[in-house]
Amino acid sequence: MNRTASRSKKVGSAARKASYRLVCQSTPKELLRVETFLFKLGRELRLDDGSIHRLVVAVTEAVNNAILHGNKQNPAKKVVISSAVTKHLLIIRIADEGEGFNPDVLENPLEEKNLLKEHGRGVFLMRSLMDEVKFKKRKAGQTVEMKLRLIVR
């Protein structure tokens, strides 16, 4: 099934104008809160199961990277997940307080030398699962912006 072409159903009118926000400490235990938040968001938007799965995996990867690499697991630093919903699009942003990085210099996880590595697939997964992924360096951190065309149940 073509993921992009099949996203033609509309989100319910109540959800169209919604926005959501979650602020987390930079500790791995917060990932459970993030997953719960994302499943709730997907259900409230009446997304199909495939879209919910893509959302949860991609955003959890981004938050995990923000906690581990951006904020270096410093619980005093925050990770902020915010989202906006339009008629056919979910825009979700994950902001950390780290120094940022250049995603263009990441190694390709599909190259043979990288296949058995334990790390290095998060950005690849985000780009594979979401319709658009952008990284933006800010004065006080980095933001990952992801867009998902909406399919509802």
Image (cartoon, rainbow, N blue to C red):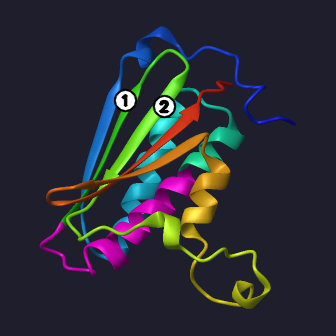
Residue 79 is a magenta residue: no
Check disc 2 and give the amino acid type.
Leu
SS assignment at label 2: strand
Q: Is residue 5 above or below residue 33?
A: above
From the image, which quarter does the N terminus lie in? top right
Left or right for 13, reference 51: left
Please name the residue that numbered disc 2 is placed on.
90
Q: Secondary structure at mark 1?
A: strand
* Up-down relation of residue 9 to residue 118 (above or below): above
Q: Are marks 2 and 1 in contact (CB under 8 Å)?
A: yes
Q: Position of residue 52 (x, y in %)?
A: 60, 43
Place of residue 148 in the rendered image (x, y in percent of width and height, measured from the top left): 56, 36
Q: How many neighbours does mark 1 have within 10 angstroms: few (below 14), some (14-19), or many (20 or more)? A: some
Point out the stretch of residues depicted in magenta. Answer: 56-77
Q: Main secondary structure of the magenta part?
A: helix
Residue drawn at (45%, 61%), measured in percent from left and top?
62
Q: Describe residue 55's horizontal placement relative to residue 33 as left or right.
A: right
Give the alpha-carbon distance from disc 2 to disc 1, as whole Å.
Answer: 6 Å
The residue singled out by tag 1 in the image is 84
Q: Nearer the viewer, residue 97 or 56?
A: 97
Q: Quadrant of the C terminus?
A: top right
Could you say which quadrant of the image residue 74 lies in? bottom left
